Image (cartoon, rainbow, N blue to C red):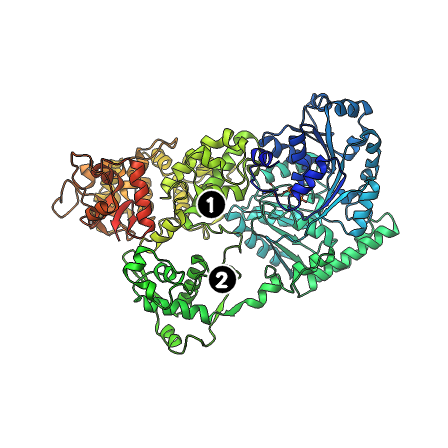
Amino acid sequence: MESTLKEYFGFSRFRPYQKEIIEKILEGRDSLVVMATGSGKSLCYQVPPLVANKTAIVISPLISLMQDQVMALKQRGIKAEHLSSAQTNSSAFKNAESGQYDIMYMTPEKACNVPTSFWSKLLDTGICLVAVDEAHCISEWGHDFRVEYKQLYKLRDVLQNVPFVGLTATATDKVQKDIINSLRMEDPYIAIGSFDRKNLYYGAKSINRGPLFVDELVAQISNYARNFESTIVYCTTVKDVQEVTKSLCEAEINAGMYHGQMGNKAREESHRSFIRDELQVMVATIAFGMGIDKPDIRHVIHYGCPKSLESYYQESGRCGRDGIASDCWLYFSRGDFGKAEFYCGEASSATQKKAIMESFMAAQRYCMQTTCRRKILLEYFGETFPSNKCGNCDNCTNSKEKSDMSREAFLLMGCIQACGGYWGLNMPIDVLRGSRAKKITEKQFENLPYHGLGKDFSANWWKTLGFQLISSGYLVETVKDTFRTVNVSKEGAEFLRSCRPDYQPPLLLPITSELDGNGGSTTGSGHDGLSQAEAELYKMLLEERIKLARSAGTAPYAICGDLTLKKIVATRPSSKARLANIDGVNQHLVTRYGDHFLQSIQKLSKQLDLALDGVGAIEVTQANNSCKAYTIPKQPKDLPPAKYSAWKMWQEDGLSNEQIANFPGRSAPIKVQTVLGYVLDAAREGCVVDWARLFKELGLTQEIVASIQAAILKVGSKDKLKPIKEELPEEVDYSHIKAWLTMQDLGMSPEAISSNNQNSCDGEEYSKGTQELSEKPDLTCELEKPVLEKTEVIVLDDSPRKRQKVEVPEQHDHPLAITEASFLDWLQKFENGVALSDILKHFNGSTEAAVVDLLNCMESEFLIYKKNNLYKFM
Ligand SMILES: Nc1ncnc2c1ncn2[C@@H]1O[C@H](COP(=O)(O)OP(=O)(O)OP(=O)(O)O)[C@@H](O)[C@H]1O
């Protein structure tokens, strides 16, 4: 069972209940599975056919749901199909009855209507189970009663000795009994898990319906869209769906809609585009309830009070099914509460009317109550929540808007002072967290009384506190060159004077999600645990995944889930074996996409200066942060939609600036220069740009870069483009100047530019950066001082006008192996640092891998640091 789990699903462990349920099914026992949305129920019926080598029949209420599951299973190398009115493959039926599929999905109608001969033939090859998914549809007490589900018992006579499994996320006691009776289950194994979805943040807010609120909603969602996060907005009426979609589209957000008045084809298309990440937002009525099986939806918003707490749980349960932190907001107006009669109109019996009324009242209570929302939800489903506060809903967190952080602030500020006040935040934080790295022992900081007192919180948590203290004026940050030092301000010193080790006066600070809870490791839907460069890599790989999915005609999540992708990012495997070891990576992914992933990881990690195979990767980045300004750009927070969409067309869809300028969908063409400006602005706001491709498109060469540099030096300023242009030959145009200046401002060095520029667009490895550059005398022609050894290069620092001189060391003839001591000795001679290519030249007795390994270790030990691709002595 475990090897099947790894081979096909990529997971190394079963989740609670899964193994027991699978064992019971394999023993032939009927089972009832009531487990939370997203808890992994599907796996309970997907593993047995692979272990038993027989077919599993799965009854599912919605065709779209079946199609999604079949698509995802095929990506895992599992033979799956669906039999329904939407099946276009004419041989599917024949293949099914001859037992060629591991998993066969059917609608309840189809299951009750296929001829008995179908079942007899299939029984001959072997059926290991009949799973009735969304089994609450059997019960009138359920919120989604389906008459056809009531007929399923008829299959029992034909499929004797085949275990039946009912699965649902929402079944009260009454509904559970209905399922057992209706499916004529005998002595079923009953597994009831917790309803708690720990990764979901719940919130509800009273609103005034109308355009003002819709504007707020659009602003909220455009933030999500910028981070590539999928969102569903559930509306109670078709009119609301249309209005919200229109507003989102006007704000240039990729939103689609889904409601009962749309034709089947349009709905399918909408659904398809959403699961393939072509739409970032789906605005829907509850017609889009169970039918969505996308694991990486980060936000579910309800615009209007839902009709029942069960449907709220189901719909909000679409969120974060991959286990990553996600949020569910419910916006209600008092007017929504007058709809009980309307919902009761759907009832076909008094029992049902009562059930509808009761659950609608429960939904209203959920909206209005000011106590823990998780507790309300769980207790509605009969589960006891052991505490009064979950800490992960608005009612629990709102009261914590400000919190007394006096003790923690005392520790951090005291430690900063004790370390002398001339470090960034990393050094005192490492002291607080009890590090014994060389940089600490050398300074004997391990003897400070603060050493180890802050172990309980992560480094990121302390950093967030540090930033809070800076913005509240207790700490001051001084930026000199690229070094940032943080020291205690006058106000901070006053606070410290009033503290004693056992007493600190209150110090109230606003609590952000990172500061809340257990050290900020689990809150927020951001890139938890990833460094900034890793978060950037994650975004790049998300885009690679979209491209792969497009070419395979599948959904990105079917290639691999977000969580798996995050693990890949944190590990950055260099080989297929290491990739396969990562939890969530299945055999199919390794064989089909392994090479592509490995190449992308290698290329992108190199661009981002990240080591492969997770060798202290996070530590290295954090260590570097103390001594180098970030070159990884920010999120495109302030990027207007027009610029963002131009960038997307250029970067993602591969269109040229000219094609974008004249794109047929535009009301009027815009200038090519304008498009280029948009793309460059997007780069400044943090969007990834394929510089090699851009330079190729613009025809920007090393020579042109050198001449622009020379012109800037001559003009003495780069504030105005015209004087620079006038110093340049005609063939150098404004686009060249703009592109180069943008790269400069992003802190990229000519070395990076030249290596990018040497590169073909198909992503071959960058190489020989500094060496190539140093061989080009025209780039160094403006240096004022005499040549030091062989040559010099200009390295642009973060401040664009600053120039450094870099001595390139002599090469020698004897093979010389690198050691920590010999390297440090040698490096100290080069005040301005040395490039990897020169290190390799000098230590020519060691392989590149060995050198890089050692450098990584030394970086994480804070012995050296890397800036603009040059290694320097710390
Ligand atoms: N053992 C496991 N380890 C890691 N992830 C798992 C495991 N089992 C399932 N998952 C993942 O959990 C997510 C939810 O699983 P699944 O779709 O089976 O949930 P479900 O219980 O059927 O939810 P719903 O009721 O919402 O349909 C999927 O992304 C799945 O790949």
Quadrant where ligand 1 appears: top right
Question: Considering the numbered disc 2 on the image, is that residue within a helix, a strand or a loop?
Answer: loop
> What separation in Å lies between label 2 and label 1 (alpha carbons)?
31 Å
Q: Amino acid at mark 1?
A: Tyr
Q: Position of residue 502 (x, y in %)?
A: 44, 76
- Left or right: 249, with 311 as reference point: left
Q: Looking at the picture, how far across and down is residue 569, in whole percent?
A: 45, 43
Residue 319: give x, y in percent of width and height. Answer: 62, 48
Q: Quadrant of residue 497?
A: bottom left
| Percent position of residue 709, x then y | 23, 44
Q: Tell me the quadrant of the picture where the N terminus can be found.
A: top right
Q: Is residue 419 left or right of residue 271?
A: left
Question: Which numbered tag is attached to residue 515?
Answer: 2
Give the residue at mark 1.
644
Crowdedness near tag 2: few (<14), some (14–19) or many (≥20) residues, C-alpha within 10 Å: many
Residue nearest the viewer, comparing 618 with 327: 618
